[in-house]
Image (tube, grey):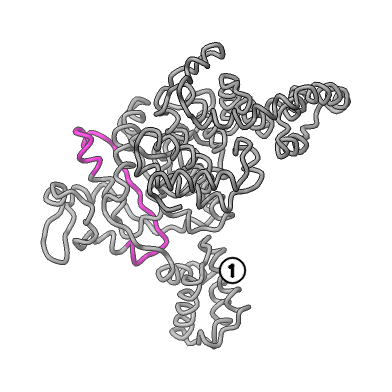
Amino acid sequence: MTRHLTDSTLERLELVMGEQLGFAFGHERREQLAVSAAARATELGLAGIDAYLERLQAPESRRDEVARLAETVTVTETFFFRNPDQLAALVEAVLPERARRGGQRLRILCAGCASGEEPYSLAIALREGVPDLDAWNVQILAIDVNRAMLAKAKRASYSPWSLRATPERLKQRYFKGSGTELELEPEVKKLVTFRAHNLAEHDPIFYRALACDVILCRNVIMYFTPAATSRVVTRLTQALLPGGFLFLGHAETLRGLSHDYHLCHTHETFYYQRKEPGVPQSVRFAPSRPLPEPDELPAAVADTTSWFEAIQRATHRVTELTTSAARRAGASSAEGRAATPSAVELGPVLELMRHERFAEARALLDALPPESGKHSDALLFSAVLLTNDGRLADAERACERLLEVDELHAGAHYLKALCREHAGDASGALEHDEVAVHLDPTFAMPHLHAGLMARRAGNALVARRELGQAQALLEREETARLVLFGGGFSREALTALCRTELGKLGGHA
């Protein structure tokens, strides 16, 4: 039957299932969907896909049919103790913090649990990491739209392949049997409850009633459309108590999706804490050493070759040439903007920066009305110009103000990395580079900066990896972002820098 499907019919099928499941269908999954729908239509004795589409959309049969097709198009690959760093962060950082808030109550949601390996791994981690766990009121709810996987999860019988990343000691302690099937011990099984639920389905009562301390939704939203992702994040936020924690997959981020969370970075992994009005984040980054005062900077950077110094050398000549023009631009801009104090016109600032007229851009930015100081783009431009001008203490303060407005701003973290490096805080610099990359994996500059720092530190392996990634990303980096963060260097110059440094390291150029 699938051979006779028209493109319009396939598109309609994909649209309907996309609406019902939230999935973005690639070519392979689209073909699987067509095959499954055709087989189901034949099984029901329907005339074809068009008839089946009517059944798929009918209120009385929609939920059952969506669940049946979901069994064929959902990603079910998982295994025990996947991403153990996140489990360690949950047990060693999150759990003590939640305990300090009173009581020994713990509600955890595992969204997109597949065949159960993730929630059972969490249950084992709790058994191992909390000596008095039996005194706690623990509930782990695991949900998935794939009913076949949920049935397997409830059986709790797994192949050795599912336990390939499980330490031998834990295999011996929590599993019995041998050969092709290993059965999970009842003391772990009783901690987890499974339920069929579609994340794409609107059900506000269900989510608000959960009142979770922790939610794991790992490697799930990466398969959704942008619109569905936004809706799912909103629902998960409704299910999470203020101050509660959300764990996503390593390749997933809340950047551009929500401002309701703090970003946490411990145990070499990232996760999120839901904000509470008037309450600071309880899990922070490692403390940073103070930035040297401006009159100390020359001594602090003597005999170094930091990326910041390269930026400053590239912009110093331009700054000198444009100083007098900047004064003229500042005076005229102040007069022109007095009548429109609410306007935040940043296009001309970016255009000046594009032409390396940094001092004029600074003057134009300074002439903006006071309320622009709360505008994220104005704060970003200010931080960039202050960095280029070598005023790193002011630049870091601008970054802090920007992060107060948008905590998940990758550019602000990259600029903070430059400031931290210049302060002699290499670990702080690398951490902010890592945060920038986590928030936006397509951002080339933090990879470049981390690669140059690794090269200077003698870590050739990391330097090759980061510089190679930067070189690849620079090819498709947005022009505006290169203007902002390229330090006055063109795409070609930055790419040549990566190629040269990789050549010195014996890497691919």
Q: Is residue 487 magenta?
A: no
- Count of numbered circles in the view: 1
- Give the left or right position of residue 184, taking residue 448 as reference: left
Q: Can residue 457 be seen in this view?
A: yes
Q: How crowded is mark 1: few (under 14 residues within 10 Å), some or many (20 or more)?
A: some
The span picked out in magenta is 125-150
Q: Can residue 284 be seen in this view?
A: no
Give how far across and how far down residue 110 sits, in percent: 37, 49
Give how far across and how far down residue 367 sits, in percent: 78, 24
Q: Which amino acid does label 1 sit on?
A: Leu
Give how far across and how far down residue 428 sits, in percent: 43, 28
Q: Which of 34 and 54 is in front in this view?
A: 34
Q: Which of 337 and 69 is in front in this view?
A: 337
Q: Residue at x 33, y 64 (%)?
A: 149
- Give the left or right position of residue 59, taking residue 465 as reference: right
- Give the left or right position of residue 492, taking residue 106 as reference: right
Q: Residue at x 18, y 51 (%)?
A: 186
- Give the left or right position of residue 153, taking residue 226 as reference: left
Q: Mark 1 points at which residue?
A: 15
Q: Residue at x 60, y 35 (%)?
A: 487
Q: Which residue is drawn at 86% across and 24% down?
A: 332
Q: Which of 219 and 456 is in front in this view?
A: 456
Q: Is mark 1 on a helix, strand or loop?
A: helix
Q: Is residue 134 magenta?
A: yes
**Residue 259 falls in image quadrant:** top right
